[in-house]
Amino acid sequence: MEKKIRIAIQKSGRLHDDSMRLLKECGIDAGNSRNQLRVAATNFPAEIFFLRDDDIPEYVQDGVADIGFVGENVVLEKNKKVNTVEKLGFGKCRLSLAIPANKRIRSAEDLAGKKIATSYPHILSGYLKKKKIKADIHTISGSVEIAPRIGLADAICDLVSSGNTLFSNELTELETILQSEAVIISNNDLSPALQKILHKLLFRIQSVKRSRNNKYVLLNAPNEKLDAICGLLPGMRSPTVLPLAEPGWSSVHSVITETDFWNIIEQLKQQGAEGILVIPIEKMIL
Ligand code: ATP
Ligand code: ZN
């Protein structure tokens, strides 16, 4: 029987939809299977397990699953023996210390002797140790943000993305301890057959990630401006230039990255480019 890679993803929660979408964009169809524990992909040698995110590092360490999609924050907190093999670019957040807005605490050092509530005792104690701050860690599993209000703690250490939860609980961020995003972890002893499947998957994921960061650009350029315009467009090798039916004009095709996108578009216009079309790329294979 063909070997299958067992992929653990979050059953429901913040990482579920993005994980499923990424698999789908990699051509791995697991259907609409949220209510099952386990589903076989139809067109890739993979089985998808739906689990609580907190359990994923342990299952991957123990070989119940071969790889898992999970937040780096969970990987570091659980401290299991697994390999982190790829960042996924979603589930971005930070683990931060926060204090009630009215507290006279200016820096992490001022937390010495104070009580900090968190669901991340391992990461927090490592941080406090490194900074030589002696504080009292109070571990709770949920709703950490209400701990100061009910007198359970002087500060909290919790995940933040927009900051809305902190704001509505009258908390202010004091310091960031960790930047996190979803990653792929793998078991340390994958067989050669499974490593081969993992490489195939990583190749697809990297193509999808690259395509998300790049756009395909088509434009018309007067021939006398071609050098200047091509200089702004690196392309995968170099831009493609084709003559237009109208004499003196060419069509230029290239790929540009999301980060300098608007900057380049403005410069292209200044150089006389017309009819600029920007098209999303579905896959980008090098
Ligand atoms: P589960 O039921 O699987 O245990 P959970 O409640 O522990 O779910 P979620 O709230 O769904 O977890 O968050 C899953 C992951 O999403 C987090 O571990 C983190 O990596 C990421 N994340 C991104 N932004 C945030 C945020 N603002 N708050 C919490 N987690 C976030
Ligand atoms: Zn969880």
Image (cartoon, rainbow, N blue to C red):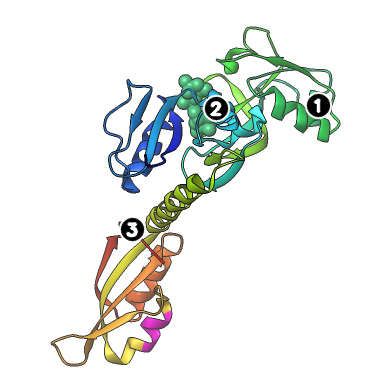
C-beta proximity under 8 Å, tags 1 and 2: no
Q: Is residue 128 visible?
A: yes
**To which residue does mark 2 refer?**
59
| Label located before the other in sequence (2 or 3) | 2
Residue type (three-letter) at the residue carrying disc 2 = Tyr
State left or right for residue 265 relative to residue 121: left
Helix, strand, or loop for circle 1? Answer: helix
Residue type (three-letter) at the residue carrying disc 1 = Asp
**To which residue does mark 1 refer?**
110
Task: Kindly tell me whether mark 3's CB lies below 8 Å from ligand 1.
Answer: no
**Hey, which quadrant is residue 175 in on the image?**
top right
Q: Is residue 181 visible?
A: no
User: Looking at this view, is 180 or 68 the one in front?
Assistant: 68
Residue at (33%, 88%) from the top-left corner?
Answer: 225
Range drawn in magenta: 227-231
Which mark identifies residue 283?
3
Neighbours of disc 2 within 10 Å: few (<14), some (14-19), many (20+): some
Helix, strand, or loop for circle 3? Answer: loop
Residue type (three-letter) at the residue carrying disc 3 = Lys
State left or right for residue 239 relative to residue 74: left
